[in-house]
Image (spheres, helix red, strand yellow):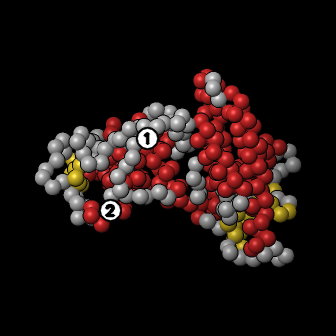
Amino acid sequence: MQWIVLSYSLPSMANTPRVTLWRRLRRLGAVSPTGSVYILPAHDECVESFQWLAQEIQQAKGEALVMSVAQFEGLNDGQMMTLFNQARAEEYEEILEALAQLERQVVEDHAEEATTADFHNTLHKLQKQQSEVARIDYFQCPQGTAVTAKLNQIKQMLTPSDASVPQIANAVIAQYQETQWVTRPRPHVDRLACAWLIRRYLNPEAVIRYAVEPEPGEVGFDMDGAEFSHQGNLCTFEVMLQAFQLGEAAHILMAEIVHEIDLRDGRYQRPETAGVDATLRGWLLANVPDSELEQHGIALFDGLYAALSSTNQTQ
């Protein structure tokens, strides 16, 4: 493997920069086998982070050196990965302890509506904390799976059972690969997510038209009378994912984000939601044309899918 190493020294009186630097290094997930030497895998974003830190150290009258290292004397790659996983395990264990306490409280007091709202807020904070650790979990620490499972378990405990959950009929991808599609103009989150699904899994060259009425032979989505639209408390993207049996972990997380932005029912609280929502609203306020909205939206959901897939989250 390739590693990136930051070695530094600060003036003895520079206590504030020293504490700030330590916090920054911890947020990056860097490990320190010895002294003021910190190590990260040589990913592009890690290299850039160390370069910026080196510049800040120098501005604080310190000295810093960033090095690319292929091998450490006395530490092989497996041992280095173990150091990273040990650091992440401590952080995950802290979350697991908080989740265990929350679970006990849910079991004891779930009947109280006000208390349930507090439970959701606590769960949201722990989900955010888990996401921050997962972002720097470079080598898939095993405790991460346990945290994810416990988050899912408590989320289910806090989700009211609904006997009216709609049953979505299966659709065969091959039967829709030559389909022409139509949806309402000024596409927002649900329609853009559906367009992403169509182009990624059905036909990257599919014709998608934006109009108030379908033409003969077109399949509508997210509009009145459409073949694919809201059902029960599911947005159209959730319906299409189920119909086409697309159930990867990243799909589920994307669906939660789309659902919350589209329906705003407080059912899901993902840390990515606010940023995605602000970006989409910004495009609409800037009066971006429909065709460009689709292009931007597909790029956005491509990036979101890649990010959620890389962290292997299944909350």
Which residue bears the numbered disc 2?
A: 172
Q: Name the residue located 49 percent from the left edge and 51 percent from the top edge.
A: 252
Would you say the residues marked 2 and 1 are in contact, meaning their CB atoms lie under 8 Å apart?
Answer: no
Q: Position of residue 193 (x, y in %)?
A: 37, 50
Q: Name the residue located 60 percent from the left edge and 41 percent from the top edge.
A: 155
Q: Name the residue located 43 percent from the left edge and 58 percent from the top edge.
A: 246
Occupied quadrant, residue 3 = bottom right
Q: Position of residue 303 (x, y in %)?
A: 46, 56
Q: Position of residue 219 (x, y in %)?
A: 22, 53
Q: Name the residue located 68 percent from the left edge and 64 percent from the top edge.
A: 139
The relative height of residue 126 versus residue 313 in the rendered view (above or below) is: above
| For residue 215, side relative to residue 126 (left or right) | left
Q: Which mark is residue 290?
A: none
Of the pair 22 and 170, the residue shown nearer to us: 170
> Would residue 144 be visible to someone looking at this image?
yes
| For residue 135, side relative to residue 280 (left or right) | right
> Would residue 278 be visible to someone looking at this image?
no
Q: Earlier in the sequence, mark 2 or mark 1?
A: 1
Q: Which mark is residue 165?
A: 1
Tell me the SS state at disc 2.
loop
- Amino acid on which disc 1 is placed: Val
- Amino acid on which disc 2 is placed: Val
Q: CA distance from mark 2 to mark 1?
A: 22 Å
Few, some or many C-alpha atoms within 10 Å of disc 2 (few <14, some 14-19, many ≥20)?
few
Q: Residue furthest left?
A: 216
Q: Residue furthest front?
A: 163
The relative height of residue 147 versus residue 285 in the rendered view (above or below) is: below
Few, some or many C-alpha atoms within 10 Å of disc 1 (few <14, some 14-19, many ≥20)?
few
Of the pair 52 and 24, the residue shown nearer to us: 24
Occupied quadrant, residue 174 = bottom left
Q: Position of residue 59 (x, y in %)?
A: 70, 50
Q: Nearer the viewer, mark 2 or mark 1?
A: 1
